[in-house]
Amino acid sequence: MDAASLVERKTLDHIEDFQPGDTVIVNLRIVEGERQRIQAYQGNVISGKHRLAKSPLPGDTFMVRRVSYGIGVERIIPFHSPNVESVKVTRRGKVRRSRLYYLRGLTGRKARIKERR
């Protein structure tokens, strides 16, 4: 008996299924004092995946990378965070690895990911 079998898995209907290489838009709830707003964060998934048939365990995360003003910005997002409003896939990527950390060293055309048809 392992710890994963003891934890109850919740279905995450607000998150589409995705895998590394996909371009996603993550809508995050930002709290500023007493006000709340939704901020969109778009980038490539470089680690972590989500399948509708098998929901992630509490504590599981995925990492989204984007380039902002020539600087690479990576954000680690927990699946079960109450601040994640939704995750939408805009583009499916064709990659052969599960962790795309090699993108950190690439710029320009070399950093492009081919689209899966």
Image: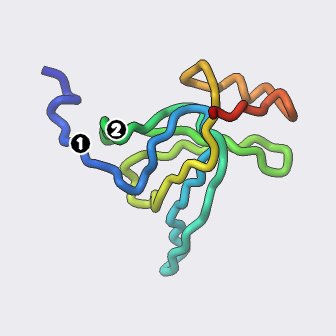
Which mark, by number, is residue 110?
Answer: none
Please indicate whether residue 117 sits to the left or right of residue 6 in the image. right
Q: How is the image coloured?
A: rainbow
Please indicate whether residue 66 sits to the left or right of residue 70 in the image. left
Q: How many marks?
A: 2
Q: Amino acid at mark 1?
A: Arg
Which mark, by number, is residue 9?
Answer: 1
As measured in the structure, the alpha-carbon distance from the residue carrying label 1 to the one carrying label 2 is 7 Å
Front residue of 50/73: it is 50
Q: Which residue is mark 2?
A: 56
What residue do we see at 45% from left, 48% from top?
A: 16
Q: Position of residue 27 (x, y in %)?
A: 54, 60
What residue do we see at 52% from left, 34% from top?
A: 19
Q: Amino acid at mark 2?
A: Pro
The answer to whether 113 is drawn above or below residue 39 in the figure is: above
**Contact (CB < 8 A) between labels 1 and 2?**
yes
If you read the primary sequence from the N terminus, does the residue marked by circle 1 or circle 2 appear first? 1
In the picture, the quarter occupied by the N terminus is: top left
Q: Position of residue 66 (x, y in %)?
A: 71, 44
Front residue of 9/89: it is 89
What residue do we see at 28% from left, 48% from top?
A: 11
Q: Secondary structure at mark 2?
A: loop
In the picture, the quarter occupied by the C terminus is: top right
Q: Position of residue 48 (x, y in %)?
A: 49, 33
What residue do we see at 86% from left, 32% from top?
A: 109
Q: Secondary structure at mark 1?
A: loop
